[in-house]
Amino acid sequence: MAEQDDAIIRVRDITVQFGSTRVLDGLDLDVKRGEILGFVGPSGAGKSVLTRTIIGLVPKVSGRIEVFGVDLDAASSAQRRAVERRWGILFQQGALFSSLTVRQNIQFPAREYLRVSQRLLDEIMVAKLVMVGLKPEVADRYPSELSGGMIKRVALARALALDPELVFLDEPTSGLDPIGAGDFDELVRTLQRTLGLTVFMVTHDLDSLYTACDRIAVLGNGKIIAAGSIADMKASQHPWLQQYFNGKRARAVVA
Amino acid sequence: MSGDPTLERIAQGEGLALCAAGNWTARFAPALERIVSDAEKLRGSRPHIFIDVSQVASLDTFGAWLIERLRRSLSDASAEAEIAGLSANYSSLVDEVRRVGPAPRVVSDRLSITGMLEQIGRTVAGVSGTIIGLVDMLGAVLAAAGNVLIHPRSFRLTSTVHHLEQVCWRAVPIVVLITFLIGCIISQQGIFHFRRFGADIFVVDMLGVLVLREIGVLLVAIMVAGRSGSAYTAELGSMKMREEIDALRTMGFDPIEVLILPRMLALVLALPILAFLGAMAALYGGGLVAWLYGGVDPEAFLLRLRDAISIDHFIVGMVKAPVMAAVIGIVACVEGLAVQGSAESLGQHTTASVVKGIFFVIVMDGVFAIFFASIGM
């Protein structure tokens, strides 16, 4: 086994290919326990592909992925399920179950995994809704009756349903108004502090990077081209980073 | 296992301290719920109760909520129960769950006689709605067709050809195979039973009339309803779910003209072709079995077939085909546009499309049978 440090996700030398297009090319990445990692990169660089590869939705050509110290390729199905119980995933479009109500969506993982009373399930469901900033009245609506921002919040509530240690957020603030997005960042921060969450966040939102993230990793040409704090990013000489962190929009955020 | 959550009761003079320890997390939720419901019975037993959480190893939403729930149920008018020993990390979590109110009640339908009668009544009343919907769609499609006749440039040839490939060309192998087998079976059964009367050769009459008038077109229509009607409903339904149809409308296009007319036209052209191919395959299969199993050689079969059937039988079969295609298409499109936001609704409407499509095809067949009988064809 590798040396014990506090990396909760350890990605080593992974390559992902669709047909003849190589999306990820020998990529290495560590996510440390308790941090919020912001993951940025140009559109189409493969940010979502990396997320989906780590959670096992996209097959990789080669490489090794460890989550909570478990090698996901070598794990038995029981070990895999145990890992899956400890993470929560917020998909870009929410991916709520369209034939279930908000209440049933949030209770779904807990109902499957925990033998607790309906009363506690209901109470926890309300607690999650309050945490993500929604009113309990939305509990019996269907996903098709929610606005885009509400779908994001319900999806986050579902991702947090089992109080996971690790959450993957795929563009959590896209499609939210700036105030809502700010609340969302604040929320992620609060949850990270209170629940000791580790957050892997794919984002385009500069505000999120400044306010929510401890560390930033940048994807380009199938590799991590830089990783570090905001200050490191701004000091980088890489042209894309220069443009991204020192461009017009970036200055507006800092000011 | 160590780390199991506990709640110890320690008397302190007049008051009572409840000392929580261990992991108060989701993994232990069933045990936690039991502990907390037990402790809730202490309500009112002592004038002053506080909950000490300083020994808790880890806390998450489940644990924090259960502690908060315990605090609420131990509080009464005279004395407020308190939470003590909160670390800075956990206090924000406890503050968070403090805002939680009661869950809204689920409104559930109770099963009752009146409820069931109501359901039956609504279903019956819904039948007229279905018919109106079908007539409405028929009108809309005809209006769109009329519009296309006046402005031929707005006709979508590419789309029509694409759908024609899907519903006609790609359906040929399966339609031919199934009708061939049905022809074989009819012929075999006919010979088997007619042989007792020494009337083997009449199997040719039966096969010819049955296949050309009824079975050929009916069977193919049922297959098309299952194969293409369901596809139309699912396509239109998922476009409806993703607001693609609304997008089309806001761009100034008529969804009937862009989406439905090419599909209808493709189906109306496809079904006669498929019915013809199906009838030929069934005759071929029947002839083959008559020859190999019944000893009716091909020349005798063809001779007998020429005597047994007239062009009328063939026309009767072919005239029905486009009408049945239109019925299948209209049902499929109405159901597709009725899909609501959920995956479940898509499934229900696709099922309804096939069931209603087949039902109306059989009803149409009956109507045609009466019609042709009365005009003597």
Image (tube, rainbow, N blue to C red):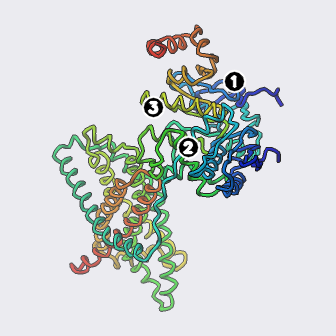
- Do discs 3 and 2 belong to a common subunit? yes
Answer with mark 1 or mark 3, whichever residue precedes in sequence.
1
**Residue A200, quarter of picture:** top right
Q: Quadrant of residue B224?
A: bottom left
Give the Cα separation between the discs numbered 2 and 1: 34 Å
**Marks 2/1 same chain:** yes
Given residues B215 and B51, the one toward you in this image is B51
Point out the residue furthest to the left here: B150
* Disc marking residue B195: none
Compared to A253, does A4 lie above or below? below
Q: Position of residue B249 (x, y in %)?
A: 28, 42
Q: Position of residue B36 (x, y in %)?
A: 68, 53
Residue B19 in view of the camera: yes
Is residue A20 toward the left or the right of residue B319 in the image?
right
Marked residue chain, label 2: A
Q: Horizontal placement of A85 versus B176: left or right?
A: right
The answer to whether residue B94 is left or right of residue A203 is right
Tell me the subunit letter for badge 3. A
- Quick one: SS at disc 3? helix
Is B229 placed above or below B111 here? above
Mark 2, Cα crowd under 10 Å, few <14 / some 14-19 / many 20+, is many
Name which residue type carries label 3: Gly
Residue located 63% across and 20% down the image: A224
Find disc 1 in the rendering and name its residue: A28
| N-term-proximal mark, 2 vs 1 | 1
Distance from Cα at disc 1 to Cα at disc 3 = 33 Å
User: Observer-nearest residue: A5 or B140?
Assistant: A5
Residue type at numbered disc 1: Asp
Query: Which residue carries the number 2 mark?
Result: A128
Q: Which mark is residue A180?
A: 3
Amino acid at the residue labelled 2: Lys
